[in-house]
Image (spheres, rainbow, N blue to C red):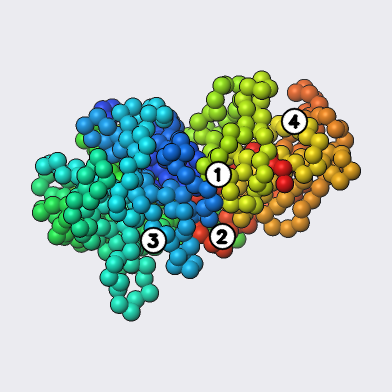
Amino acid sequence: MYTNPIIPGFNPDPSIVRVGEGYFLVTSSFEYFPGAPIYHSTDLIQWTLIGHALTRPSQLQIQTPEPGGGIWATTLRYHQGTFYCLAACFQRYRPQEDDRVWPRGFYVKTTNIRDSDSWSDPVYFDQVGFDQDLFWDDDGTVYLSSTYRKLDRTPHANLKDFAVHTVPVNLETGASLAEPRLIRESASGVAEGSHLFRRGEYYYLFTAEGGTESGHCEWVSRSKTGPLGPWEVALTNPLWRNGLSDEVQNTGHADLVEDTKGQWWVVLLGVRPVWRGGAWEESVFGRETFLVPMDWENDWPVINGGQKIPLEYSGPQLYQFEHPVAWRDDFDQPSLQLGWYRKNTPLVHDYSLTEREGCLRLYGGPYNLSIPACPTLFLRKQTHRICTWETRLSFTSEQKHTEAGTVVWWNYLTYSSIGVRRSATGSRMVRFQPAEGDVLDFALKSQLSDIVLTIECGSSYRFGFYEFASAENRQTVQWVGEVTNSTMTRAPPVGAAFTGMMLGLYAFVS
């Protein structure tokens, strides 16, 4: 028995490799920096964040993306001692207006995946698109696959016409060595998330189809000829189908790995909505990473026996593991813990871990939380539905337009914050700014005490605070308001909500 998801919280589009006894996995990061989080496991159940592939401005420049922009589906591959991470960065993505600027894909590489600083600067391909994949054929030819709109549109059809294109490339320069070949399109209008493999006499092409929402599913084709086809489509497609009445939905975007005992596994994305009031409520986690076994029958892959993706699975060799809820950061190390993220690529160093011992000091920037630029904002992924986020804040600024506090973050168009600032008379106050409704202010008794800001997460987000007297004299929380999960997960007017809920710390002067 084991429990899905294996990596909870916002971790979409997983891609996996095994090297020796260990497994390495990357997920998408969208508008967050550092990008392309790398996880490691020895048993496919317990995963540890070990670093990121995109940690420098020379690798990743995200400045004012709308929701859904940034680094899309990354792919992780290993070849002859080198790890490759492929990515594409959308700076403009407006599906409401069918307005997209196709990014140029790239890869970074390293021989030491545990050292985030060792990843190279990008090598860009001369092909646009997203969901890049690399495949090394037996003759040494390297093939790049990516998704972009068909050049010859489907006549009289209101479709996205997103299709998988493949081309041999010079890996050193990223240059194409031939004209790209369209190798897979879908009647749904979307074929993406492609991964090429070879097993025995067959080449296999896995594709995510139907879009990443309720129509999401996985297809497979095979060829005896080569990575460019022609392709035989499996009669069993889609390989499984989770629907709108299931506890796991929107499943797809699969990648494969064979374990040390010869068992094959698939990692994929899915979402966990909550049934409330006779309807499904959007998951606060967004898309997460799931695991199911895979078998081969007549040289065709059979994923999870063709059955729906479950939350609980009695799988071979694996075991039950409960992800810990408790986490704490006392900021007593010389660098930030892994797992803190910035919205966009920061342009300045706006914090210190040494200026005051055991504290994270934030130098509030000129951007408040509603501006699409990079604010002084540090975020962590919410990984449990029921939990409490507590922040102890020391606030001494004399400027009345300065604010510092904690936030529940969906995107810059939808967030709820509780922070400390100066009132018009110069005294300190707590300001609660919900994602929907009126801003509320609450006077503080002391002008010097630390303030403990509290967010209870569950069926809604409840916000409160108390003035810190001492560790032994804990005060009663004064609750100031709450925001429903459905309000926090509403769809943005531009872009798309491809990420999950974050909890964080901020400061600004505005």
User: At which x and y percent is residue 54?
Assistant: 42, 38
The amino acid beneath tag 1 is Lys
Rendered image: mark on residue 394: 4
Please state which of residues 20 and 149 is positioned toward the viewer in this rendering: 149
Disc 1 residue crowd, few under 14, some 14–19, many 20+, Cα 10 Å: many
Residue 439, position as x, y percentages in the image: 76, 53
Sequence-wise first label, 2 or 1: 1
- Residue at image position (48%, 34%) is 322
Q: Nearer the viewer, mark 2 or mark 1?
A: 1
Q: Quadrant of residue 164?
A: bottom left
Report the residue at 39% width, 27% height from top: 115
Measured in 3D between alpha carbons, the distance from the residue under mark 2 to the one under mark 3, in whole angstroms, is 18 Å
Q: CA distance from mark 3 to mark 4?
A: 46 Å
Between disc 3 and disc 4, whose residue precedes?
A: 3
User: Label 1's element?
Assistant: strand
Whether label 3 touches label 4, CB < 8 Å? no
Q: Which residue is mark 3?
A: 211
* Frontmost residue, 46 versus 309: 46
The residue beneath circle 2 is 492
Residue at the disc numbered 1: 343
Q: Calculate the distance from the C-alpha at mark 2 to the C-alpha at mark 4.
A: 33 Å
Q: Is residue 254 visible?
A: no
- Given the current orientation, which residue lies at the most extreme bottom position? 156
Check whether the beta carbons of the residues at disc 2 and disc 3 lie within 8 A of each other: no
Q: Is residue 196 above or below residue 26?
A: below
Residue 475 versus residue 304 in the image, above or below: above
Residue type, mark 2 in image: Pro
